[in-house]
Structure formats: structure tokens, C-alpha cells
Amino acid sequence: MFYILPTPIGNLEDITLRTLRILKEADLILAEDTRTSGKLLKHYEVATPMRSYHAHNEHNIVEQIADHLDAGQTIALISDAGTPGISDPGFLLVRECVQRKIPLTCLPGATAFVPALVVSGIPCDKFFFEGFLPHKKGRQTRLLFLAELPYTFVLYESPYRLVKCLEQLQEHCGADRIAAVSREISKVFEENITDTLPNLIEHFKAKKVKGEIVVVVAGKENTSNKKA
């Protein structure tokens, strides 16, 4: 059996009892970074063996892992934080399991964009999840596409590129577009701020930004919305 398990994106208490049970009962845990996951497993006294599974090796070991699953092993996949497969490794192994008809399930749990979207005050009845924009090639094309969407869209961004990202969004979406930035979700210094893009740029230029970033942007048809 193959389990895809969400892990906390901040507070270590944001984990389900079922996830903990499976982590302890599995034959093997695939972890994006064994050092990062090791802290979580140590906290909950999970002694299951770990193996690295990340973007740089997944192409080479997918079939090998699937062979172990075919042989009857129970394997759990976790990422550094959140749900594997959402801007994290996991898709290739899931696809291989589906093709081989290996039983698999993904437990519900932590993922960064959902709480950011909900607290933004920006319409979330319909939205587009973009994830990380390309760093260089194709970035402008994606921004042009996103700027024309009639409904909310969601981005992931590095704290080091946040201001540049907001400036590019202003360039393509206009200064009246409402957006929200969430960072350090579920952690002590969590911050959620909703405002126009120029005000967000001014706010984050004036401070040192840390933590994982989620940017939520109102759709083109909602540009007349007042600040949430």
C-alpha cells in the first residue's frame, strides 16, 4: 500500500492521528529531506526507516520504489511540509502506482494555499492555482495569462523574490488590483495582509521577509473590489 501523507507547514500539532499511525506502521518513509523530516519524526517518536525522495532522484528510483510496493511493502511519502505532489515531488510515483494498479491513498491535511486563500477576503468560490512561476523563461507569458483571468489566482513565491513578484504583478495587472500575501502560516510570526499591489510592495520593501510565501490575487473582474 502506498500512502501520501501531508505534514505540518508550521505548528507541529497540525498533523492527524491517522498520519502518525501510518508513519509508525509503514515499512519505509520516503522523505524530501531526511534532515527536515527527521525532526518531525523524532518529535513524535517515529522510528520507521527513511529514504530520500526528491526532485533530483525521483526519476531514477520511481520504478524501484514501485517494485517494493508491488512486493507488498507499505510505503509512506512525505515532503518537507504540506501535501506531497503540490509543488513538491510525488506525481511520478503516484502515476507509476496508478499504471501498475498499486493501491494508494492520499490523506487530507495541511497545504499552504488553502488557508491563505480563505483568510485573504478575496473571492474563493472559483480560483486558479498556478504554484511557482518560472524563474526566467516563460515567466512573462504566464503573467500575461494570469492577469487576464476573471477569477482569483494563487502563487507560491520565495521570500527573496516576493517584492519583484509583486512589482511584476502590478505591471501586468494594474495598480488597482487587490492581492493578499500570507507567510509563516501556522507559525508564531504568521502574517496575512490584503491590500492593493502598490501598498503590498511598499509594505514588504520596508521589512526583511522570511518564510514560505503564498500570494493570492483577485481576478480581473474583481479589480473594483474595495480593500478586504
Image (cartoon, rainbow, N blue to C red):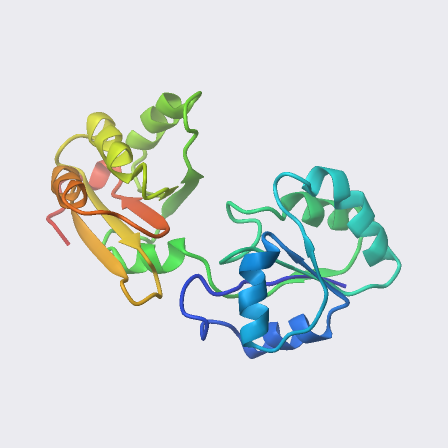
Seen at 26% across and 48% down, the residue is 209
* Residue 213 position in % (x across, y down): 34, 48
Which residue does the image show at 25% across and 29% down from the upper left? 168
Quadrant assignment for the C terminus? bottom left
Q: Position of residue 111 (x, y in %)?
A: 45, 58
> Camera-side residue: 124 or 120?
120
Q: Nearer the viewer, residue 5 or 97?
A: 5
On screen, residue 67 versus residue 17, left or right, reads right
Residue 138 in percent (x, y) is at 43, 22
Between residue 171 and residue 100, name the one nearer to us.
Answer: 171
Check the image and report above or below for 52 versus 13.
Answer: above
Please indicate whether residue 206 sits to the left or right of residue 17 in the image: left
Q: How many marks?
A: 0
Q: Quadrant of the N terminus?
A: bottom right
Q: In screen coordinates, is 125 left or right of 36?
A: left
Residue depicted at x 24% and y 51%: 122
- Quadrant housing residue 26: bottom right
The vertical placement of 196 against 70, above or below, is: above
Q: Give me the residue at 80% from left, 53% from top.
A: 101
* Residue sticking out furthest to the right: 71
- In the image, 110 versus 54, the foreground residue is 54
- Find residue 142 and report its image quarter: top left
Q: Where residue 186 sits in the image (x, y, percent)?
A: 35, 66
Residue at the extreme front of the image, as rendered: 35
